[in-house]
Amino acid sequence: MVTGKWEVKRENIMQTKITNLNMDYRYGFSMPEKAVFKTRKGLDEQVVNEISRIKKEPPWMTKFRLKAYRIFQKKALPGWGGDLSKINFEEIYYYLKPTFSRASSWEELPEEIKKTYDIIGVPQAEKKFLAGVSAQYESEVVYESINKKLRKLGVIFCDMDTALQKYPKIVKQYFGTLIPPHDNKFAALNSAVWSGGSFVYVPQGIKVDLPLQAYFRINAERFGQFERTLIIAEEGSDVHYIEGCTAPIYTTDSLHAAVVEIFVKKNARVRYTTVQNWSTNVYNLVTKRARAESHALMEWIDCNIGSKLTMKYPSVYLYGEGARGEVLSIAFAGRNQLQDAGAKMLHFAPNTSSRIVSKSISKDGGRTSYRGLVQVMPGAKNSSVYVSCDALIIDEKSRSDTYPYMKIKESETEIQHEATVEKLGDEKLFYLMARGLKKVDAEGLLVNGFIEPVAREIPLEYSIELNRLINLEMSGSVG
Amino acid sequence: MLKLQSLSVSINGKQILHKIDFEFAKGKIYAIMGPNGSGKSTLAYTIMGHPTYKLAKNSKIFYNGQEITPLPANERAEKGIFLSYQTPLSLAGVKVNQLLQLALSGKKDPLFIRRQALKIAKQLRINEDLLNRSLNEGASGGERKKMEVLQAAVLDKELMIFDEIDTGVDVDALKSIAAYLRRFQKDKAYIIITHYNRILHYLKPHFVVIMDKGKIVRVGDRQLAKQVEKSGYGEMGS
């Protein structure tokens, strides 16, 4: 279905990315803010109504938003994880629209947006490459082009707003059913003000053999991004979705509160890969959940670098017999950063299996926490659980904690749990330096070696970028 | 080539080497022998610049006339020194090709390095798979030592120190290692640290240096190694 040309194009992209990473932009770059429309600062019912009105949404969505807003108001902030008290919800613009109409070709894009893409590495990409890329700039997806072949197969890949207009039935059937607004305060907030995000629908038996990719950007001060993603993989289908993020540096705090819901039907497989590098002022509070039916496979691959605070625990609800769930994650915390990440696996049916592999690195006083919940319900016989969390601590100032929760209500369950904490060893450093490697290169090599079991699951161009990000973080040139 | 001047070394306050003065010359192979704890490995690590080994104030190391005493290990490697480990570490997720490419970045073409590594792996009878796996993870003693020699060969330094390259190695591995070492070139120098003279049956050193209690107690030719084999280190100090 996909030609060899695809690979060639990806290499071009890769190269551009590498060049761009050499630039001293410290992962933060921002184009002059030129929003055509934005709501006023702060949030109330009027703003929620306004967002829904501008988007010309059906009444049920407006109601959904308003209900969610009321829940958001009532819900308390989570009492665990990181410090969220500094988030000032009144100082945030909840909706921003950069251009009125969506561009359908590269040439049509405004110069500024093109420039931003160039820096992230969605450069003068040929249309062929862009087919398959849904790119998000500020709160609205402005550039999107769908591979015609995908369309022929009946695969829908578009932004969430478009989906609501064009496929209201499917959206209404699934939207907010796996992560209802009352799930947590940030899910409620997202439900009230969501904008953008991706919608993916893969019909029965269809295997999409190129990854669907979306690039996200936050590019406005005090502007939170609340994208909403919904993926439905029908029986026997197979799809890989990738999101990659970099964000500009700003002095005031930025909020990213996304919701991702995934439905993996019988015998289907969904892989969701995230490589995120938010700038260090961003609160990254994301609720990600998948529901796996019988013999379905859900794989979350989650790499978190950057942000001020990340709280993210991708989960899989294993509802069908024989369903499998995996979460492979990498977290890197530098100075003033807390990565509170982990996974949740809920076994509801017999013969289900879950696997969690977490690799975290803390440096320069950064903190990583693994927080995981595995729950095996009564009757989920013959289930197996594997949890492995490894922490690498680079220096004395840094810290790592592990909070593994296991609630096993079924005795016929096989459970394996492994946890290691290691320090970057002087002997290993010396060994590499004696071969001629500079100290920073040696450290980078060891850290990349540490995350390799997860990194090898990421597509090449992303893992190369990740590799370079880690090297740069290790060299201390990123603040 | 490498000159040690009044080299006294201690670890955690305990003195291991005592005022060693010695010069290693280009084009020569040295065998350093001595009983356990005589300071052989300490000498090797000190030459390479291991930060745990503290040098006394007047101790100096010169390489090709330049003082290298304050230099970190990577700069010594840059100047042309290589150390093969007695017990090579295993590095999770680090492939030998990655290591070599970083060590030679900007000096040699990555493709050339890859080919070179492959060629030498064949000569040393290293399974090609090992090049693309985590370095030394789950590897036998012999495989680890061969991997050290492979790195030595690709990095191709001027002064190469092999710390007990013959320990924990079966006969076949020893033969392939020795076969490589025998291709010694005149513009280099080898320091072979060994307990027994097992490897010296395959490789003829120009000098045999005997260490005991942190000092060099005797220097001689190959006959000295034979003497050690026969009657041990007992009378060497006298």
Image (tube, helix red, strand yellow):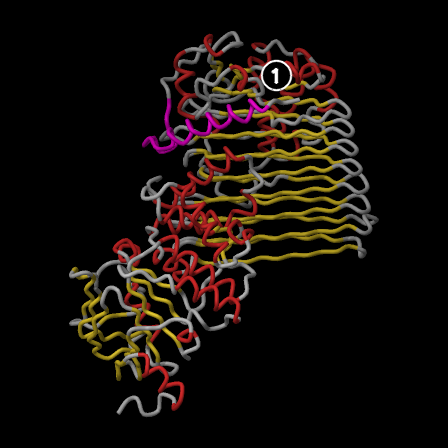
Q: Is residue A195 visible in this depiction of the protein?
A: no
Examine the image and state in which quarter residue B73 appears: bottom left
Identity of the residue drawn at 38% across and 51% down: A442
Label 1 element class:
loop
x and y percentages locating residue B155 in the rendered image? 36, 53
x and y percentages locating residue A308 in the rendered image? 44, 39
Magenta highlight range? A4-30
Q: Nearer the viewer, residue B138 or A170?
A: B138
Assign the C terminus of chain A to one quadrant of the image: top left
Q: Main secondary structure of the magenta part?
A: helix
Identity of the residue drawn at 72% across and 38% down: A297
Q: Nearer the viewer, residue B170 or B67?
A: B170
Is A157 positioned to the left or the right of A429 in the image?
Answer: right
Give, as a three-letter code, the residue at label 1.
Asn
Q: Chain of mark 1?
A: A
Q: Is residue A54 above or below residue A373?
A: above
Q: Is residue A88 magenta?
A: no
Examine the image and state in which quarter residue A77 appears: top right
x and y percentages locating residue A368 in the rendered image? 49, 48
Identity of the residue drawn at 48% across and 26% down: A224
Is A198 positioned to the left or the right of A207 in the image?
Answer: left
Identity of the residue drawn at 58% across and 23% down: A197
10 Å crowding of disc 1: few (<14), some (14-19), many (20+): some
Q: Nearer the viewer, residue B92 or A353?
A: B92
x and y percentages locating residue B205 in the rendered image? 33, 73
The residue beneath circle 1 is A147
Q: Nearer the viewer, residue A177 or A275?
A: A275
Q: Is residue A272 visible in this depiction of the protein?
A: yes
Assign the N terminus of chain A to one quadrant of the image: top right
Q: Is residue A172 above or below residue A375?
A: above
Is A368 positioned to the left or the right of A200 in the image?
Answer: left
Q: Is residue A16 magenta?
A: yes
